[in-house]
């Protein structure tokens, strides 16, 4: 945070709160590919919370309307009993000079990092009851009055997602198949309510006593409340755990908590539809984030890394659609002639892995944000190393296999699926698509 920005924010808060605001600590927090998040510590004053959280749009990418909507959502959520931070100030409908588009809120206790929530012993006693409590929280959330949150988007979710998909890149077979399945199996809407839009492990603050806060309302909109339940159950948000509700526990407990609070018993088939939608939606969001990397900024590397996570969603969607594993086994293998030393030794994969190790070692003892960014950099270097080792040969192999199906490229095959000329139920097609996805995933994230 620049001195100019810090001074402007301190002056603004002093005016809003009627007490002199002096920051004694300012720290950029890790995570948050779309917005900056800062921890602010202030001098003790009865009118001023000692710890604050600042969320702001990156300079040059301000969206004050959405920021204002998010601030109103926090206030209305608190009214219906959803645990949320208190909004201290926000920029309103226009970016403020020297500060931009932002909101400032109180800092709540608790942990949001999924890996800690799922693995640390201190959360062991609370994990088992979280699915039920999350269901009750959603039951309260869906009682929010939409009129109290001006500016909530209201659109057909599937058509909107299709528009974002076509805007952010070429067609992919697994995603085309998912759109087709969602269209063919779409259930009637249960009702319309405020939908949080990003209610998941990672946006929930938890301590040993339970849920302490629901964060990040920037994607709130009007829609079917079952969308929030399906998103919470999407595999991406389980972080390696086998349990479907955020990695914590069962759908039955989630549904029971929701019914006890709202009087509405979720239909498992409807929630499943939204779970498929959630995996497809996350794939499209990953493509959107990768496109944003072209705008520059200090999180470019993270955005590029997120773009490669589309492969995870493709794998999840094929599993959800019941496409069987390929019989060809492990497709990824060394792709180059080891005797080919045109560019000398060591080879590019070995060079990249050496840089990867260096980046991790060089960040030891650094501040948390630098450590986080070094891990992202090491992850990207690992992707590049794996692709360099197998990329050429596998491109040639898949070009041949696609040709045997009558297509020159994967995009052409995807368009064939869109047109209904072929389906994934046809064994040769399903095998090629499964192998394409598995190969991408083993390069992008072999531990997924």
Image: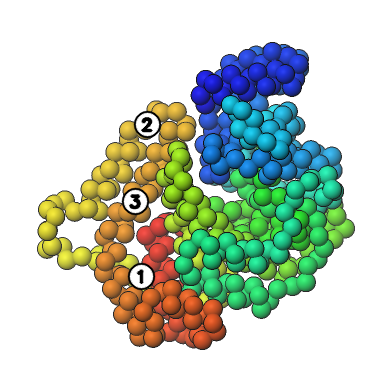
Residue 126 lies, in percent from the top left, at 69, 43
Residue 236 lies, in percent from the top left, at 56, 56
Q: Is residue 290 left or right of residue 82?
A: left
Residue 329 in the image: above or below residue 284: below
* Cα distance between the residues tagged 3 and 2: 19 Å
- The residue that label 1 is drawn on is 330
State which quadrant residue 74 falls in: top right
Chain-order first, disc 3 or disc 2 = 2
State which quadrant residue 359 falls in: top left
Q: Is residue 17 left or right of residue 388?
A: right
Chain-order first, disc 2 or disc 1 = 1
Q: Tell me if mark 2 has few (under 14), some (14-19) or many (20+) residues whose alpha carbon lies within 10 angstroms of its own.
A: few
Q: Is residue 132 left or right of residue 260?
A: left
Residue 386 lies, in percent from the top left, at 31, 57
Residue 355 lies, in percent from the top left, at 27, 43
* Cα distance between the residues tagged 2 and 1: 35 Å
Residue 19 in the image: above or below residue 269: above
Answer whether labels 3 and 2 touch (C-beta < 8 Å): no
Q: Nearer the viewer, mark 3 or mark 2?
A: 3
Residue 312 can be seen, yes or no? no
What secondary structure is found at the residue carrying circle 3? helix
What secondary structure is found at the residue carrying circle 2? loop
* Cα distance between the residues tagged 1 and 3: 19 Å
Residue 106 in the image: above or below residue 166: above
> Which residue is painted at 44% across and 56% down in the image?
308
Q: Tell me if mark 1 has few (under 14), some (14-19) or many (20+) residues whose alpha carbon lies within 10 angstroms of its own.
A: few
- The residue that label 3 is drawn on is 382
> Which residue is painted at 68% across and 53% down in the image?
197
What secondary structure is found at the residue carrying circle 1? loop
- The residue that label 2 is drawn on is 364
């Amino acid at each position: 945070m620049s001195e100019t920005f810090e001074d402007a924010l301190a002056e603004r808060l002093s005016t809003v709160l009627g007490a002199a605001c002096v920051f004694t600590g300012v720290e950029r927090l890790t995570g948050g590919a779309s917005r900056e998040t800062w921890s602010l510590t202030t001098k003790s004053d009865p009118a001023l919370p000692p710890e604050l959280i600042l969320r702001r749009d990156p300079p040059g990418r301000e969206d004050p309307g959405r920021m204002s909507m998010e601030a109103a959502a926090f206030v209305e959520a608190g009214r219906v009993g959803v645990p949320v931070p208190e909004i201290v100030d926000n920029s309103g409908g226009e970016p403020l000079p020297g500060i931009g588009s932002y909101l400032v809120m109180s800092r709540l206790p608790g942990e949001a990092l999924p890996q800690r929530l799922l693995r640390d012993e201190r959360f062991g006693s609370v994990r088992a009851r979280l699915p039920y409590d999350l269901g009750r929280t959603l039951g309260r959330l869906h009682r929010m009055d939409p009129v109290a949150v001006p500016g909530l988007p209201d659109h057909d979710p599937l058509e909107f997602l299709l528009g974002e998909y076509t805007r952010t890149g070429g067609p992919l077979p697994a995603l085309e198949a998912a759109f087709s399945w969602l269209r063919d199996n779409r259930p009637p809407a249960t009702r319309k309510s405020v939908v949080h839009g990003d209610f998941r492990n990672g946006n929930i603050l938890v301590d040993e006593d339970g849920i302490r806060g629901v964060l990040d309302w920037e994607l709130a909109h009007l829609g079917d409340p079952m969308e929030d339940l399906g998103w919470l159950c999407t595999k991406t948000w389980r972080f390696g755990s086998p349990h479907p509700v955020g990695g914590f526990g069962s759908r039955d407990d989630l549904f029971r908590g929701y019914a006890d609070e709202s009087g509405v018993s979720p239909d498992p088939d409807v929630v499943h539809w939204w779970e498929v939608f959630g995996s497809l939606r996350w794939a499209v969001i990953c493509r959107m984030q990768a496109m944003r990397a072209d705008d520059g900024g200090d999180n470019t590397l993270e955005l590029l890394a997120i773009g490669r996570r589309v492969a995870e969603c493709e794998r999840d969607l094929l599993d959800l659609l019941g496409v069987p594993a390929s019989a060809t086994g492990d497709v990824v293998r060394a792709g180059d002639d080891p005797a080919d030393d045109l560019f000398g030794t060591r080879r590019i994969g070995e060079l990249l892995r050496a840089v990867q190790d260096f980046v991790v070692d060089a960040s030891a003892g650094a501040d948390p944000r630098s450590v986080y960014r070094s891990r992202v950099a090491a992850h990207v270097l690992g992707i590049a190393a794996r692709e360099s080792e197998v990329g050429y040969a596998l491109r040639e192999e898949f070009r041949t296999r696609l040709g045997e199906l009558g297509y020159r490229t994967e995009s052409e095959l995807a368009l064939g699926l869109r047109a209904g000329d072929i389906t994934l139920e046809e064994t040769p097609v399903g095998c090629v698509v499964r192998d394409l996805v598995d190969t991408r995933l083993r390069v992008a994230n072999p531990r997924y």
